[in-house]
Image (tube, rainbow, N blue to C red):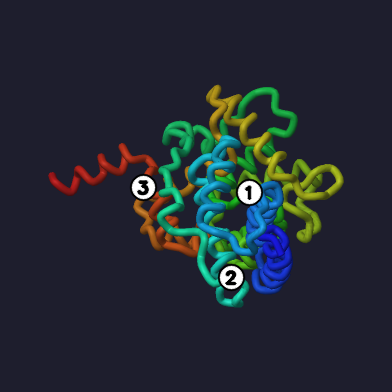
Amino acid sequence: MTAYEKFNEIKTAYLSSLQTITKSKATYDKYATVINDFALWLGQNDTEQPDITAVMVINYSKAVKERGTKNNTLRHYLIILRSFFTWCINHKFYTEQPVLEEDIPKQERIEYNLLTEQQIQTILDGKMPPYLKQPLRDRALIVLLIESGLRVSELTHLKIKDIDFDGGTINVHTSAKGDKSRSTTLPDRSKQFITEYLYRRFGSYCYDENELLFANDDGKPYTRQNITKIVRGYIRGLFNRNDIGAHDLRHAFASLLLTRGAKLEQIQQVLGHSSYATTVIYASHLCPKRVSQDLNKLFT
């Protein structure tokens, strides 16, 4: 049995096991993509020996880099493969770990595109760019992203019934993260803009609360590409910027909370980060000038 044949056989068993263990489709899809990619490379570079060696993994890494893949993505690939081979070793399919820690690239700092505080405030004040086909929808969507910190995947599946207008909260369901639920913020401004948008959409204040908050003409959820297009068009129309996407508004939300005195533990909770370290990464690059200015006051 060649390395490719053995790997392919084990891969099927592993993915079947993973599908049973994980509740997150997104996690499963990521692992399956990487493992299938390695299998494809292995099939093109097969050897007669049955085991996977560290040299083979290094050669795979080189091939991935030659595609133009960034170091952080390659790091992600190798971490997944290391996890796969750990499972294989535990199940006695292989005896040695071929993905060595020293061969995994160090994580590079990601630079995020941020709106300035003035630009954020302009959006929150309700200013809209000209020539929008659905201005009330777009304004409600943009402001909600900034004031709630929702992920795009969470926004696309948000239903009207998930909005607690009286309590000022949103009940968030995160299937991509394993069917987790949490609450996040719903300030008065978002409530106002959502209410105005829903009235325009349904023609009255009476509507089925099981309806999606944002949906296309067929009542189906928007895609990630739909949301990205709305956000980019709105920001471009207001500030002539083409570098802001929907996820950047999640960072704007964290920035607002941080600079207005929220604790990192609170930010972690409403963002839905399972790891405190992830929230620290968010905070480490948000409005550094403003944070430094605030800290200066401690010395006066």
Mark 2 element type: loop
Instruction: Check the image and name the residue furthest to the right.
Output: 218
Kind of residue at badge 3: Ser
Between marks 3 and 2 in the image, the one whose residue lies nearer the viewer: 2
Kind of residue at badge 1: Val
Give the class, few, some or many, for how many residues have Cα within 10 Å of label 1's Cα (few <14, many ≥20).
Answer: many
User: Looking at the rendering, in which quadrant would you find the N terminus?
Assistant: bottom right
| Image: 44 above or below 232 | below
Which is nearer the N-term, disc 1 or disc 2?
A: 2
Q: Position of residue 43 (x, y in %)?
A: 71, 51
| Towards the viewer: 84 or 294 | 84
| Residue picked out by circle 3 | 284
Give the class, few, some or many, for how many residues have Cα within 10 Å of label 3's Cα (few <14, many ≥20).
Answer: few
| Image: 128 above or below 16 | above
Q: Residue 186 lies in what quarter of the image?
A: bottom right
| Towards the viewer: 115 or 143 | 115
Kind of residue at badge 2: Tyr
Q: Position of residue 79 (x, y in %)?
A: 52, 58
Query: Separation of disc 3 and disc 2 at Cα?
Result: 40 Å
Q: Position of residue 178 (x, y in %)?
A: 63, 66
| Image: 57 above or below 245 | below
| Residue picked out by circle 2 | 94
Residue beneath the point at 60% across and 67% down: 181
Mark 3 element type: helix
Query: Separation of disc 3 and disc 1 at Cα?
Result: 22 Å
Q: Residue 193 lies in what quarter of the image?
A: top right
| Residue 162 visible within the image | no
| Towards the viewer: 6 or 124 | 6
